[in-house]
Each structure stands twice: as structure tokens, then as C-alpha cells.
Amino acid sequence: MLQAKFCPDCQTEMQSGVIPDLAHGVTATTKWLPGTPPFDTTFWGNLKDRDGRLHHSTSLPVITWRCPDCGLLRSYAHES
């Protein structure tokens, strides 16, 4: 269960949600990956690490909280 978050600006309780990634006709939840992999400069603009691929086993789902009063967004990547 997610613990309630409060806006640091308004002190209003924030709403949890996700920002979807849309690529190649597929919608997925945004993921956090450790490190700073270089961007692949191909037509598709894919991310790759030094091995030429991403290691999804180290990725974490990203939950984004939105303040209904001021619109502030705060994103968190939590371990399950």
C-alpha cells in the first residue's frame, strides 16, 4: 500500500498515478534504471547500456504523485 504524500508547496494531499511510456504502439509504465547509459542515436532513439542492451532486472517502476491544487509532480522509484 502506498503511503500518502503531501505537496511541499501547498501541504495538500497528493494523488498517486503513473506517466505512461508510449513507444512502438505499446504503452508501458515508466521505469527507473541505475547509472547513466548513453543514448542510442538510431532512428528509434533507444537507450542502451555499455553492453548494448538494458538490464530490466535492475529497473524499478516509477510512481508519480500530483498535487490537485498546484499541479506539482513528484516521481518516486520504489522497490516492490
Image (cartoon, helix red, strand yellow):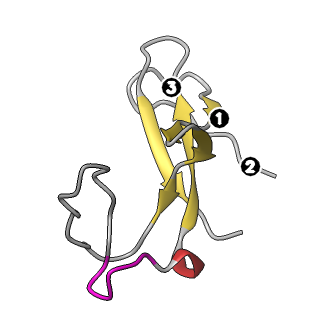
Count of labels in the image: 3
- The residue beneath circle 1 is 16
Task: Name the mark nearer the viewer: 1 or 3.
Answer: 1
- Magenta residues (range): 49-54
Please tell me which of labels 3 and 2 falls first in the chain.
2
The answer to whether residue 67 is magenta is: no
Task: Name the mark nearer the viewer: 3 or 2.
Answer: 2
Please tell me which of labels 1 and 2 falls first in the chain.
2
Q: Secondary structure at mark 2?
A: loop
Q: State whether residue 62 is above or below residue 74.
A: below
Marks 3/2: CA–CA distance: 18 Å
Which residue occupies 54% across, 74% down?
56
- The residue beneath circle 2 is 2
Residue 4 picture location, percent across and down: 68, 40
Please tell me which of labels 1 and 3 falls first in the chain.
3
Answer few, some or many: residues within 10 Å of disc 3's Cα (few below 14, many 20 plus, some between 14 and 19): few
Question: Magenta span: helix, strand or loop, mainly?
Answer: loop
Answer few, some or many: residues within 10 Å of disc 1's Cα (few below 14, many 20 plus, some between 14 and 19): some
Residue 13 picture location, percent across and down: 62, 26
Which residue occupies 22% across, 57% down?
42
Which residue occupies 40% across, 78% down?
53
Q: State whether residue 58 is above or below residue 1.
A: below
Give, as a three-letter code, the residue at label 3.
Gln
- The residue beneath circle 3 is 11
